[in-house]
Image (tube, helix red, strand yellow):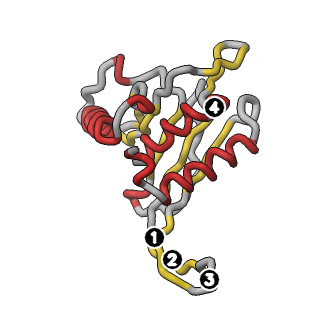
Amino acid sequence: MIVKACAGLLAANRELNVSFGGDKLVVHQRVHVGVAVAVDGGLLVPVVRDADQKSLTQVAREAGELVGRARAGRLGGDDMGGGTFTVSNLGMLGVEQFTAVINPPEAAILAVGAAGPEPVVTADGEVEVRQVLRLTLSIDHRAVDGATGARFLAQLKDVLEQPLRIVA
């Protein structure tokens, strides 16, 4: 869901869907989201191409297949490279929050931590226990303004809090 949500927001926020092309900034018209995968001996980043144009089911299936092939050592050259943004998830290892390192030449990466129950004060002053997910966006300030990154995170929060918007 996070890869699909990011893809949709990147399509709407082209100023974050950028990378360095030599000595200039390239604004990408297509959204290719990398998914960081830990493997023996390092990290691989297979790419879900045109993720914004695919359904949630298609993105989930393709990302799952890429992760499986990465762990089995069966990625092809076409599976990697050309990403315009990366998602890195350590939540499954119980890591609550971390800062991911940007995958050059991309200008941003999203770090996804573990979701867990936390007390939250509601709008009417009541305290409820809710699932809280911590996200950290690392951006290269040479390419993307911090305010642009903050708007993206705010939009991502809104979309993830209303997950039916991802499938629509």
- Please report contact status of discs 3 and 1: CB closer than 8 Å, yes or no: no
Identify the disc placed on residue 18.
none
Front of the two marks 1 and 4: 1
- Tags 1 and 2 in contact by the CB under 8 Å rule? yes
Kindly report which numbered mark, 3 or 4, lies closer to the viewer in this rendering.
3
| Pick the front one: 85 or 1 | 1
Q: Marks 3 and 1, Cα distance to the nearest angstrom?
A: 18 Å
Tell me whether the residue at label 4 lies in contact with that at label 2, contact meaning CB atoms closer than 8 angstroms: no
Mark seen at residue 118: 2
Which x, y percent locates residue 33? Answer: 46, 32
Q: Residues within 10 Å of mark 4 (few under 14, many from 20)?
A: many
Which quadrant, please, contains the C terminus? top left
Find the distance from the CA under tag 3 to the CA under tag 2. Answer: 17 Å
Residue at horizontal 36 percent and vertical 32 percent from the top: 54
The amino acid pointed to by label 4 is Ala
Label 1: how many residues lie within 10 Å, few (<14), some (14-19) or many (20+)?
Answer: few
Across and down, in percent, residue 125 comes to 63, 85
As drawn, the label of residue 124 is 3
Residue sitting at x 55%, y 39%: 9
Label 4 sits on residue:
107
Q: Residue shown at 68%/46% (left/top)?
A: 151
Residue reaching furthest to the bottom: 126
8 sits left or right of 122 in the view: left
Number of the label disc, if any, that sits on residue 131 = 1
How far apart in space, not on screen, are marks 1 and 4 (Cα)?
29 Å
Q: Quadrant of residue 11?
A: top right
| The quarter of the displayed image where residue 107 is located | top right
